[in-house]
Amino acid sequence: MTSPATAKSTTASTTASSTANNAPIPFIDLAAQRARIGARIDEKVLDVLASCRFVNGPEVSAFEEQLAAFAGAKHAVSCSSGTDALALLLMAWGVKPGDAVFCPAFTFCATAEVVPYVGATPVFVDVKADTFNMDPDSLEQAIAVAIEQGLTPRVVIPVDLFGQPADYDAILPIAEKHGLKVLCDTAQGFGGTWNNKRTGSIGDATATSFFPAKPLGCYGDGGAILTDDAELVTVLKSLREHGQGVDKYQNVRIGMTARLDTIQAAVLIEKLAIFEEEIAARDRVARRYNELLKDVATVPVVDPRATSVWAQYTIRLAPGVRDGLADRLKAQGVPTAVYYRLPMHLQPAYKHYPSAGAILPVCETLAEEVISLPMHAYLDETTQDRIVAAVKQALAEG
């Protein structure tokens, strides 16, 4: 099996040329990964094309078995996206109008988007300043707010933001005390661990995404649910196939069409085979970033109980510095991204929903200070040094 280091050598001349010419650096280098395993993926995709089993082909069930084994879960149910994975679980649990679902406000909209789908009410929770993940104290406050407003607390959706698992040691007892289902949103964190347990084997169920930019991504949209609950799996498989019963022409519940395409399953089988190595490579890149940038920025912190898959490498800067830095880096061919400029409780489509407080101070502060740098398993030291030098220069000039 080719190693990430070997894969890097195949593009070494290109990287050197890009560095010398100040050419744009990819934010996530999918091409480097494709250089490593593209031939294997092409072969598996051609097998699917030859079989013409484009929906529910054997690769789908094979991938589900391998995914569950990787995560340490009893079952995996693949689906069409991470958003649909979240929605399917709320549907399967019968979440309905009058129910409250608790979401961190510092996340991508999909986490909360699925709650109104089923008529329920998202209630927004603040996050911790160090890990950016759900604050258990704010969760308790949000539950109290929901009850005061006559809502029934039903589900909490911790998000494993930027690759790091949430504080499940604190969240799970709160959920048990209030009778909440725990739906772990590990769209960014799949492959990480909490107390040596993989994401996907924590809580009542886990939803993840295989969007191409994710640490484990396919060549389009895709997602999955992981759980130990066999009865839940039966309902989920029905819901993702129009609520079918004994066959597709018997409909026993209101469902949707949310299958993972066979071609995407074939791609994911090959990517899962190298995922452990890529996680280790991402961690090396992140640790090196931390060492090189700790004197000029607030670098990310990983809880000692956790490991991160580093879906993003995100630093914090003093207020007012970020946008100038981004402009200077762009001029030097270094891309950046901001996740997230506007917390969920301030988004136009969501600001009428309840929150743990009128102000969620940590979310609102982070939204003004965070910026993410290029991060992927194939980021070589030469390119990383160029990024770091550009950051330091830009901050010195700013």
Image (spheres, grey):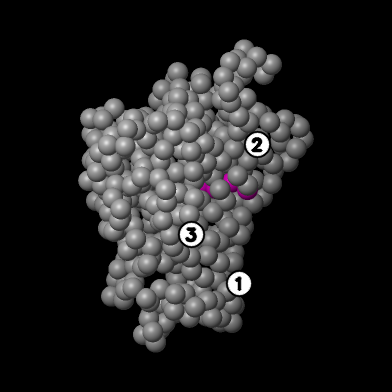
Dot 3 crowding, Cα within 10 Å, few <14, some 14–19, many 20+? many
Q: Residue 83, which numbered label?
A: none
Residue at the disc numbered 3: 376
**Magenta span of residues:** 215-219
Asked if the stretch drawn in magenta spans residue 218, the answer is yes
Residue at 22% over, 46% down: 137
Horizontally, is 290 left or right of 250 in the view? left
- Answer whether labels 2 and 3 touch (C-beta < 8 Å): no
Q: x, y percentage for residue 43?
A: 69, 43
Q: Amino acid at mark 3?
A: His
The residue that mark 2 highlights is 261
Q: Main secondary structure of the magenta part?
A: loop
Seen in the image, is 329 located left or right of residue 264?
Answer: left
- Quadrant that contains the C terminus: bottom left
Three-letter code, disc 2 = Asp
> CA–CA distance between discs 3 and 1?
17 Å
The residue lying at 24 percent from left, 35 percent from top is 174
Q: Earlier in the sequence, mark 1 or mark 2?
A: 1
Report, in whole angstroms, how far the alpha carbon at label 1 lies from the one at label 2.
34 Å
Disc nearest the viewer among 3 and 1: 3
The answer to whether one can see residue 372 in this image is yes
- Name the residue: 52% across, 41% down: 83
Q: Which residue is mark 1?
A: 14
